[in-house]
Image: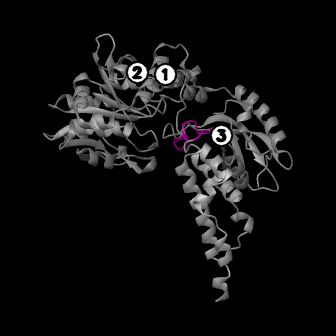
Amino acid sequence: MLAMTEPAPMFAKLPSVERVLASEPGSELVGAYSREAVADGVRRVIDGLRERMKNGAPVDEAALEVASICSAVTDLLDGASRGALRRVVNATGVVLHTNLGRAMLAAPALEAIRDVASAACNLEYDTEAGRRGDRDALVESHLCELTGAEAATVVNNNAAAVILVLNSLAEGREAIVSRGELIEIGGSFRIPDIMAKSGAIMREVGTTNRTHKADYERALGERTALLLKVHTSNYRIIGFSASVDLPELADLAAGLDDAYVVEDLGSGALVDLTRWGLPAEPVVADRVAAGADLVTFSGDKLLGGPQCGVIVGRRDLVERIRRNPLKRALRCGKTTLAALEATLRVYRFDPCPERVIPTLRYLTRPLEELRSLAEAAATMLSDALGEPFAITVEQSTAQTGSGSQPEVEIASLALSVSSPEHSPDAIAARFRSGDPSIIGRIEKDRFLLDLRTIDEPADLVPQSAGQARRPA
């Protein structure tokens, strides 16, 4: 009985919400944050103290004072009022890391976003004619010039592009696809699921490792709406395998009424990557020239622009897609279009896009450049961490990421951070706890900071409010 009544005096010492708000530190909080946010924070802190007392947990009387409660509310609001989406340092060695936002935008794209986000813009207004315009017109001419397509449209990601094309051209009819191309990518995105949601009827042909032209021929019929080819960018089938080339599919579709060839390229390179010594990747313009009626691809993968899905190809088919009510539901906003248009301008007019587009720059950086960066970063990091940490420069392998070129390893350099007193997991946690978070990788019981996507040596030095630079 005594245990139940003993905390009563402590409960009585809890101040009311109004008393805290009326206090001097409470008034200062209300001056810094909205009254509603402060009141909610005070309520949460007091409720937390009350709950601890009910559970018999020890509570220091100093924690019940108004000043202490206001201090706790300050910490609470400081954390809650920070942006949820924050900058991090990508030292994983994955250039296009899906979890870390994929492509970083080029300077012209960032400038274009600032311009249209801070003022009115001509998103759907033709300034020459003085009447309503079409937002696709902002990027269509660039896309057509770069790909050789007759027309182009843009939606909010490539999955949306695929489902919109299928729904527009094959709803209620058959879309033929090889079993070897029924891929799944990150986030459990599966081609069969997308096809089902689009209203198209999936007709599988061939086997996992071998599909022949005759397999498609046997599946053709009156209900055939399109032949879908999916670039298997995130895996490879090697050994006893066969697939049907795009020109052969185009020949088959040409013999049918109202049937088309659509290719989902996924990553979607606008330029030939082999010019920089990188492995070949299907170029959109080549696929259009090879006979695809429509090609879909991502804007934030190998293209190096904002997240979006691009559809290029025949004008009559693009117009059908634009008339689909789903197009409005999936369309892009002004900041995405501004970033995409600026990125496309770089590809179209700049003689060295690899110097401007971060994705291309990171993929093509020479090891000599990384070596100079590594030496400077190792010195700075060693000074910041001190004893008992050891910083060494090691050879590393980077990857393109986001399902692009999965088997390709790019030579890189990394800083290895080790300590006899701290595990790799503890070191990784310390780097993540900085502001900004520094994200590396653990490999063979070592914490590594890959340098391929690092611009400045100081980016790898953990920053925090205090002076401590050591893992807990």
Residue beneath label 3, please?
A: 91
Q: Nearer the viewer, mark 3 or mark 2?
A: 2
Residue beneath label 1, please?
A: 115
Quadrant of the image for the N terminus? bottom right
Residue appearing at x 45%, y 38% in the figure: 233
Q: CA distance from mark 3 to mark 2?
A: 37 Å
**Which of pointers 3 and 2 lies earlier in the amino acid sequence?**
3
Is the residue marked by circle 2 packed among few (<14), some (14-19), or many (20+) residues within 10 Å? few
Q: Is residue 92 magenta?
A: yes
Overall secondary structure of the magenta stretch?
loop
Q: Give the x, y percent position of residue 217.
A: 21, 39
* Residue 211 can be seen, yes or no: yes
Q: CA distance from mark 3 to mark 1?
A: 30 Å
Residue appearing at x 57%, y 27% in the figure: 358
Q: Give the x, y percent position of residue 5.
A: 64, 83
Quadrant of the image for the C terminus? bottom right
Q: Amino acid at mark 1?
A: Asp
Part of the protein shown in magenta: 86-100
Q: Are marks 1 and 2 in contact (CB under 8 Å)?
A: yes
Residue appearing at x 44%, y 28% in the figure: 335
For this rendering, which residue is in front, 58 or 183? 58
